[in-house]
Image: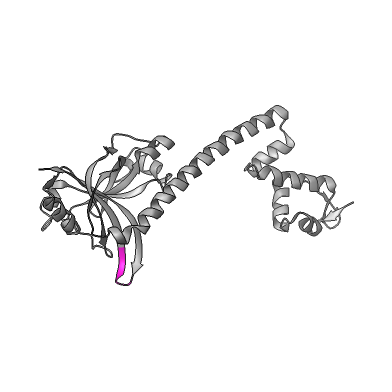
Amino acid sequence: MKYKISEVSKILNIPIDTIRYLEKKDIVNPVKDSQNSYRFYDAWDINFLNEYKRLRSFDFSTSEVREIMHHDNLKNFIDRIDERQYYFEERLKYYRMLAKKNKEYRLSLKNIKSNLWKCSFMQCPEVYYFIHRFNYKYIKMDKFDGLFESWLNYFPFVEPIIEMQLEAIGHRDNNNDHQWGFSIKKEYVDAFNILLNDKVKHIETTKSVYTIVCAGDKGSFSLSLLNKALEFVEENNCKLTGNVIGNLLTRVHEENGYCRYIEVWLPVEKK
């Protein structure tokens, strides 16, 4: 029995345009009426379209499906299924890590208001990071030897980081120098074998003062946002031991205007 393309579309719940596309991709080859070029599909064609849907469900591309359906022998097909197993295990690993990351991020967001401007002693996480912007000027991308482009592929594990130099903090009344870049925790570097080179800095976990600060709209960031945290450092008879780093948690619109919430770690030790 022969079926028109509209009938096949209803049988398989595949849009007509998709069936035409699959014909162009040589997935299916219906008989054409020589007089009016109407396409007619038989059970064989419909089986091929069903097989296409089944193979696509294994996340094979259309071109891969064409090769499987028209060229692969059993060994070739088994090799492809073996590759799929590796692919799915890697994706499963990725989504497990993504679920973990999302859980951490959700907790950080929910704790913003309770931690805003409040200080506590906390171990800074072990991270890798590199700087790509000094104040408001970006470094040329060709200086990173592919690092910048590579790390962009690992959002959301890669986070925006701000680094505030110890010397600038000491002169914050007339010095607002700071720099931005990307950071990633060591566990994600290890999990995904992320590219590192001599542009990347490494911070081991260290005793720090932790707080969350809120910067406003464009151009409003100031090192004076650290004032309360630095007062806390002094009150606890501690001193800064290095540069301060922070991660931009989110940008949102509050009642008092545009807000950028930044979690900050100030490395310290007893005087």
The percent position of residue 53, horizontal first and vertical second, equals 70, 47
**How is colour applied across the structure in the image?**
one colour
Residue at image coords 61%, 36%: 84
Viewed as shown, does residue 31 lie left or right of 67?
right
**Which quarter of the figure has residue 86?**
top right
Q: Quadrant of the C terminus?
A: top left
Q: Is residue 139 visible?
A: no
Magenta portion: prevailing SS class: strand
> Magenta residues, as a range?
255-259
Residue at image coords 73%, 49%: 23
Q: Nearer the viewer, residue 131 or 94?
A: 94
Viewed as shown, does residue 85 lie left or right of 234?
right
Residue at image coords 27%, 63%: 218
- Residue 215 against residue 269 in the figure, above or below: below
Viewed as shown, does residue 234 lie left or right of 219?
left
Q: Is residue 214 visible?
A: yes
- Does the segment drawn in magenta span residue 23? no
Viewed as shown, does residue 201 lie left or right of 190?
left
Q: Nearer the viewer, residue 168 or 63?
A: 168
The percent position of residue 50, horizontal first and vertical second, equals 75, 47
The percent position of residue 139, horizontal first and vertical second, equals 28, 47
The percent position of residue 210, horizontal first and vertical second, equals 24, 51
